[in-house]
Amino acid sequence: MSALSDSSTSSQLPSSSPAVEGHVGHGVVAAGSYSTEFEQTPVSSSRPLAGTATLDPVSAEKPLPFRQDTYRWNRGHYSRQRRFVDIWGFVLRLLSARWRYGKAWSYGGTITAEAQTIRRRQLAVWIRETLLDLGPTFIKVGQLFSTRADIFPIEFVEELSKLQDRVPAFSYEQARDIIEADLGKPIHTLYRTFDPIPLAAASLGQVHRAQLHSGEEVVVKVQRPGLRSLFTIDLSILKGIAHYFQSHPSWGRGRDWIGIYEECCRILWEEIDYLNEGRNADTFRRNFRGEDWVNVPRVFWRLTSSRVVTLEYMPGIKISHYEALEAAGLDRKRLARLGAQAYLHQLLNNGFFHADPHPGNIAVNLDGSLIFYDFGMMGQVQPVTRQRLMSTFMGVAQRDAEQVMNSLVELGALTEIEDMSPVRRSIQYILDNFMDKPFEEQSINAISDDLYAVAYDQPFRFPATFTFVMRAFSTLEGVGKGLDPEFNFMEAAKPFAAQLMTNGNPTDGANGLLGELSRQAAQVSTSALGLPRRIEDTLDKLERGDIRVRVRSVETDRALRRISGVTMANNYAILVGAFTLSATVLVLSEFIWLALLPGALAVGTGIAFLRAVLKVNRADRLP
């Protein structure tokens, strides 16, 4: 959700954030067109303040008008029973679609890879649209899941990343009541002027422009009414769904649904705490205190609460509006480099980073400096985690599957299992194919996609921080390539990676060699120190009988599957005969109604018998 700048020639409201609502970006402003003049308008006026931007209907997305009945959730009070029916109805329809996905009859008799891909894409679109209908909680959950390619197929992840958080605004009267209740004073004593028409609206809140009595221009972000009660109801229902999936014999295996639920809860509650957002903005501002090429809006704490946050009005050109950037005489290649440097500075120098640096959350000042908005969702990386992340990237660069796997285990992104060789082989396959490409063709997007591809079929559990980092890298690479088609994020990252690996010292040839020797020595010493423990663990497993030897044979597996199929077919055949005989006896005894039950069971088991026979035939045809 973005606030808006004034522009007499080019003025646009940025699109709402696809992953994090509430950004107070300030739109597009053409060079020299920004005006700070405010008319002395009463706070309760029904018209916009003089000086507020006039939206261009062609290029701007206006906030949807206030309508109480647009969505069932768009109200201050919610029915738990209604929400229970809506949410579980969605889950049951989703499970039904998943069940039909593997059934040949649902494809007209033949399953093809192309047909399954089309089905997955159609299902992904339906999920995105249904999440929007279900409201703020599920919009946010969907946006969080757009980073979880370790859980969902790539088609779902791609579609969820398009989830637009753009919903009708709530009324000015509701916004005024929340401001006055939280800040404890009438709105006219808090703000000299207050625009009753929101600049942007999203599921968690909306942004209004205002002016303080001191003359400073600000934007006021107000939380949607009843949001906390809606979160409480929805998250309690989601907890039951998480427990259901965790207890399922197949869906729960290798997936920590309870942990994912708890992670979502933590992130969602933090995002609707505007005091937390204010603290994040202050921290982010301090981290760039000595950098004149990054600007962060100032928080007005006297006018901030858990549901209201007042920030400095800081207009700029949206970083993806290339024509406006060129009209302002700004160097797009330089801006691409600055975007990468800003994020790497956050991640590697401070460990406190913007979790969603998409174009709606980054603008450009007329002097060429960057402006960041929306601090509701931030990530924090501890120094040891930073080293492990860098170790993962170094392992990718060196095609060292063992290092990548060990780093992912240390990050908590990979669960150790008895036989890690399939995981190691999968990672090595990816690295071999990935590194065969020229460096210019490599990208952060490719690295993250390849790592995620392994994750879906292996025991990966990517923590939120890891997925946020990968998504942010991919997003920034897209922003950079939009500004400069020749932009390469990997090239931009090299100086920062070298700085981190050498604790801030520039890398020359001798230092590089010493650094590599030191790294290998540390690796050997770590392995040597861990050797006695591994030997002891192996001996303990031998004593307990926990070590198992698995021998795989394609012919044996196929024979076992055929025997199992034949056995099931025989069982169904016996049941069909028994039910048919029972129905016949009852009909002959003139118990027609009673005969319907065994007759129906005979039909059902007959269908199961035919399916078992077809399964055996397919197994026989396998090469």
Image (spheres, rainbow, N blue to C red):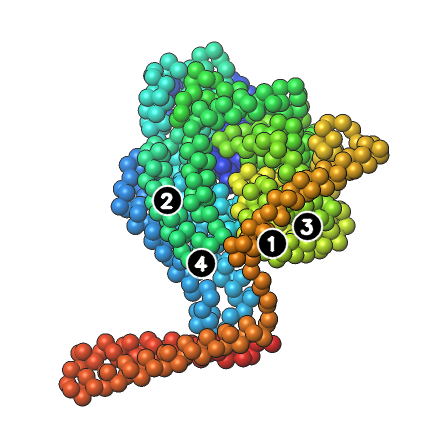
> Label 4 vs label 3: CA separation?
28 Å
Sequence-wise, which precedes: disc 1 or disc 2?
2
Q: Nearer the viewer, residue 215 or 514?
A: 514
- Residue 459 locus on image (x, y percent): 54, 52
Judged from this view, the residue extending furthest toward the left is: 590
| 582 vs 156: above or below | below
Residue receiving disc 2? 239
Mark 1 neighbour class, 10 Å CA radius: few under 14, some 14 to 19, many 20 or more: few
Residue receiving disc 4? 250
> Label 3 vs label 2: CA separation?
37 Å
Mark 2 neighbour class, 10 Å CA radius: few under 14, some 14 to 19, many 20 or more: some
Q: Secondary structure at mark 1?
A: loop
Residue receiving disc 3? 401
Residue receiving disc 1? 420
Q: Nearer the viewer, residue 280 or 304?
A: 280
Name the residue at 52% across, 57% down: 545
Judged from this view, the residue extending furthest toward the top is: 214
Front: mark 3 or 1: 1
Front: mark 1 or 2: 1
The amino acid type of the residue labelled 4 equals Ser
